[in-house]
């Protein structure tokens, strides 16, 4: 399914919906890809601890990327936005900033043409959306010797 795009200002869809639809599809595609290529016949709790931990790490990394994309889409508010990192800030005779943007960013040429023109800098606070209810649990390869041994979370 192609991702929705806003072509005209008057046709612009709700930004939160656009980001939600995009993130949902991206996460779905990632999970489907993992399921398609996971030929392990063992159920999760019988897989080796190392394999469980690797799967959790790959999934966490991918989801972190998609959450970052969603936050950027929402913060842009439907406007064209080049993504980058603020690497230098100087307050002397006004404020001067250096923002590093990937050389492959689709708006790189528009930015070059826009030197000396007004721009708007929007802060996308991604960190506030990187939390989790709890860390995923990995089933240890070696179980407890006795049923009455204290568990890690006790």
Image (cartoon, rainbow, N blue to C red):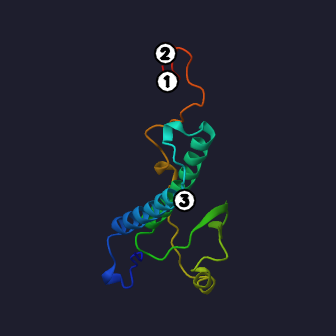
Is residue 43 left or right of 100 when viewed as pictured? Answer: left
* Quarter-of-image position of residue 20: bottom left
Question: In the rendered image, which residue does mark 3 sit on?
Answer: 37
Crowding at label 2, few (<14), some or many (≥20) Cα neighbours within 10 Å?
A: few
Is residue 98 left or right of 135 when viewed as pictured? Answer: right
Q: Are marks 1 and 3 in contact (CB under 8 Å)?
A: no
Q: Say if 132 sits above or below 150 in the image.
A: below
Q: Residue 147 shows which numbered tag? A: 2
Give x and y (percent) for residue 141.
60, 31
Identify the residue shown where x is 54% and y is 59%.
37
Which is more toward the observer, 109 or 153? 153
* Quarter-of-image position of residue 143: top right
Q: Secondary structure at mark 2?
A: loop
Mark 2–mark 3 Cα distance, whole angstroms, equals: 36 Å
Question: In the rendered image, which residue does mark 1 sit on?
Answer: 153
Q: Say if 25 sits above or below 111 in the image.
A: above
Give x and y (percent) for residue 34.
52, 57
Identify the residue shown where x is 31% and y is 83%.
10
Identify the residue shown where x is 57% and y is 80%.
107
Which is more toward the observer, 70 or 30? 30
Q: Secondary structure at mark 1?
A: loop
Q: Residue 143 shows which numbered tag? A: none
* Quarter-of-image position of residue 14: bottom left
Crowding at label 1, few (<14), some or many (≥20) Cα neighbours within 10 Å?
A: few
Q: Say if 54 sits above or below 98 in the image.
A: above
Between disc 1 and disc 3, whose residue precedes?
Answer: 3
Give x and y (percent) for residue 31.
47, 57
Between disc 1 and disc 2, whose residue precedes?
Answer: 2
Between disc 2 and disc 3, whose residue precedes?
Answer: 3
Give x and y (percent) for residue 7.
39, 84
């Amino acid at each position: 399914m192609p991702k929705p795009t806003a072509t005209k200002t008057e046709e612009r869809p709700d930004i939160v919906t656009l980001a939600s639809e995009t993130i949902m599809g991206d996460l779905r595609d990632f999970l489907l890809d993992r399921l398609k290529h996971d030929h392990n016949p063992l159920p999760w709790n019988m897989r080796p601890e190392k394999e469980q931990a690797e799967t959790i790490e790959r999934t966490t990394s991918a989801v972190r990327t998609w959450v970052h994309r969603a936050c950027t889409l929402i913060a842009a508010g439907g406007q064209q936005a080049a993504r980058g990192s603020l690497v230098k800030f100087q307050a002397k005779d006004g404020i001067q900033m250096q923002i590093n943007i990937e050389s492959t960013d689709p708006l790189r040429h528009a930015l070059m043409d826009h030197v000396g023109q007004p721009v708007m800098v929007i802060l996308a606070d991604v960190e506030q959306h990187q939390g989790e209810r709890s860390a995923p649990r990995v089933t240890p390869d070696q179980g407890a010797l006795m049923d009455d041994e204290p568990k890690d979370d006790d």
